Image: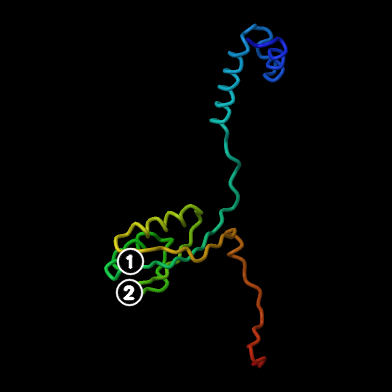
Amino acid sequence: MSSPDQNRDTHIRLGNRNKDTHEPPELVQHQARQDSEQDQDTHTPPPAQDPDTHIASFIVQHRDSAADALGALIAAHPDLELALPSPTRSIVICESADRHAVMQRVDQLQALPGVLNVLLVYHHAEPAPALAEPLATSTVTPANGATS
């Protein structure tokens, strides 16, 4: 049994919902929980900002027999590129607007028969508009200090 003080606190916390209906506090709490859950279900996420471009590189360690399957998987996904093929280790580049795609590609590569390991070597994310901006020109001075 709840005390009058607890009932009063419940009425205050719940915005006095049962003030006029004289519903028991337990029912009011249940209704408040349901209202809160409905609010969560109908909550719309904030508008998305400019999507980031995610650039990642992987070292794929594989058997000779996996080369064809590796090539087929890479050909099937436009966000993948075989940067450096090798009989047992290949470098794969992933460039995607979806941050989850990078890890999905790792999982897909690992699932190929004959793939022993996939190592994420590098991952960089940058707003897509920033990648379209021109690079500032700079001069490169050789290590020996000579100028051309």
Which of the 4 quarters of the picture holds residue 107?
Answer: bottom left
User: In percent of the image, x 56 and y 56: which residue is there?
Assistant: 52
**Image spot of residue 111 (x, y percent):** 34, 57
The three-letter code of the residue at mark 1 reads Gly
Mark 2: which amino acid?
Pro
The figure's colour scheme reads rainbow
Residue 71 is left or right of residue 34, and the answer is: left
Q: Are marks 1 and 2 in contact (CB under 8 Å)?
A: no
Mark identifier at residue 138 = none
**What residue is at 65 percent from the left and 11 percent from the top?**
2
Label of residue 87 in the image: 2
- Dot 1 or dot 2, earlier in sequence: 1
Q: What whole-number distance in Å separates the C-alpha atoms at marks 1 and 2?
A: 12 Å
Specify the quadrant of the image occupied by residue 89: bottom left
* Label 2: element kind: loop
Indicate the quadrant where residue 24 lies.
Answer: top right
Q: Residue furthest left?
A: 65
Q: Which residue is mark 1?
A: 71
Choose between 66 and 140: the one closer to the eye: 66
Under tag 1, what secondary structure? helix
Whole-percent x and y of residue 92?
42, 67
The tally of labels here is: 2
Locate residue 14, reporting x and y percent. Answer: 67, 19
Residue 32 position within the rendered picture, expressed as x and y whole percent measured from the top left: 60, 20
Circle 2 Cα neighbour tier, 10 Å, few/some/many (<14 / 14–19 / ≥20): few
Decide: is 69 above or below 32: below
Q: Tell me: residue 110, above or below residue 49.
A: below
Please identify the quadrant where the N terminus is shown.
top right
Given this view, does label 1 or label 2 mark the residue nearer the observer?
2
